[in-house]
Amino acid sequence: MAASSTTSIDRLKIQLEDVEVVFDVGTSVITALESYSLDIAEGEFVAVLGPSGCGKSTSLNLLAGFDHASAGNVLVNGNPIVKPGPERGVVFQNANLLPWLSVWENIVFGPKVKGLSEKQYRARAEELISLVKLDGFEKHLPGQLSGGMQQRASIARALINDPDVLLMDEPFGALDAQTRISMQELLLRIWEDDKRTVMFITHDIDEALLLADRVVIMTGRPGRIREEISVDFDRPRTYQVTSSPEFQQLKQHALGLLHD
Ligand code: ADP
C-alpha cells in the first residue's frame, strides 16, 4: 500500500490533455472542467472521486463522446473522440435497459445492431449472462428484475461489444448497501479476469479505494485534479480489505483532501 502523486504509465489508453469544458446556459456560462489532464494506461482501473457537481460525469462524458471539450485534447488509443463508439462501453447509474426487451435481447442488442448473426454472438452472450449471474433470467423483462440484477445486465450489455475501455458513471450509486458490496465484488472478479481499462466515477471513498489501482481526487467546480493516490492492495481483492488499518489510513488521507 502506498500513496503517491504520480503513477508510471506504460501503455497509454486514455489521454485527457489540458481539457476545458464550458457549458453555455443562456444567460451565463459554467466552467465544468479547467486545466484537466489525466492519463490512464491500458488495463488500469482508475476511480475518479470528488464532490457533487465537480465535473466527474463531464470527464467521463468526454471519453464516451457525449460531451465535447471547449479546449484541449481527448484521446483514446491516440485518436480524438468525436462521438460514441462500441469500443467504449458505458454503464450508467440507472441501468437504462430497454423496458420492452428481455434480458437476453437487451444484452445482444449491440451485436444485432452491428449486423452479427446469432451464431456469432450466442456463445459470448451465454458466457456473459453466466458471469453476471443472470442464468435463468434471460426471458425476463427489466421491470421484473431487482436494481442489482438490472445493473448486472447492463454490465453484460457493455461487455458484449468487447470494449477497449469501460466507462462507469456511479454504476452502483442507486443500489442498497448490501447489493452494492456484492456488485463491487462481482466487478472486481470480472475486472481481475481480463484487466480491461476502466474509468469509474464515484463519490464513495470506500468504493474507489476498494476497486481501483489509482484514485483521482478532484477539486470543486471548476473541476481540476487535486491529487492522485496509488492503491496497491493485493489482488484479488475482497471487501475485507476495507477493514484493514492501511485502508483506513488511505481513506483518512482521501477524506482530508476532499474536505480541505
Ligand atoms: P459531477 O458528475 O461531479 O456531479 P457534472 O460533471 O455532472 O458533475 O457537472 C459539472 C458541472 O457542469 C455542474 O455544475 C453541472 O451543473 C454542469 N453541467 C453538466 N452538464 C451540463 C450541461 N449539459 N449543460 C449545462 N451545465 C452542465
Image (cartoon, grey):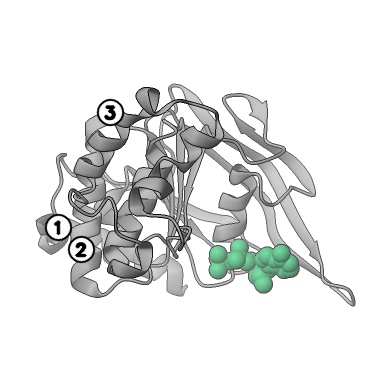
Q: Categorize mark 3 by other alpha carbons within 10 Å: few (<14), some (14-19), many (20+).
A: few
| C-alpha distance separating marks 2 and 1 | 7 Å
The mark nearer the N terminus, 2 or 1, is: 2
Judge left or right: residue 140 versus residue 89.
left
Judge left or right: residue 85 versus residue 204.
right
Q: What residue type is labelled 1?
A: Tyr
Q: What element carries label 3?
A: helix
- Residue marked by disc 1: 239
Q: How many labels does the image show?
A: 3
Q: What residue type is labelled 2?
A: Ile
Q: Most extreme residue toward the bottom, as rendered?
A: 27
Judge left or right: residue 253 versus residue 48.
left
Residue 54 in sight:
no
Find out if the beta carbon at label 2 lies less than 8 Å from the nearest ligand 1 atom.
Answer: no
| C-alpha distance separating marks 1 and 3 | 31 Å
- Residue marked by disc 3: 123
Whether pointer 2 and pointer 1 mark residues with C-beta atoms closer than 8 Å, the reply is: yes
Judge left or right: residue 142 versus residue 136.
right
Residue 108 in percent (x, y) is at: 41, 40
Residue 241 in percent (x, y) is at: 13, 55
- Residue marked by disc 2: 181
| C-alpha distance separating marks 3 and 2 | 29 Å
Q: Which residue is drawn at 28% across and 64% down?
A: 148
| Viewer-nearest of discs 2 and 1 | 2
| Viewer-nearest of discs 1 and 3 | 3
Q: What element carries label 1?
A: helix
Q: Is residue 122 above or below residue 144?
A: above
Q: Residue at x 74, y 41 (%)?
A: 72
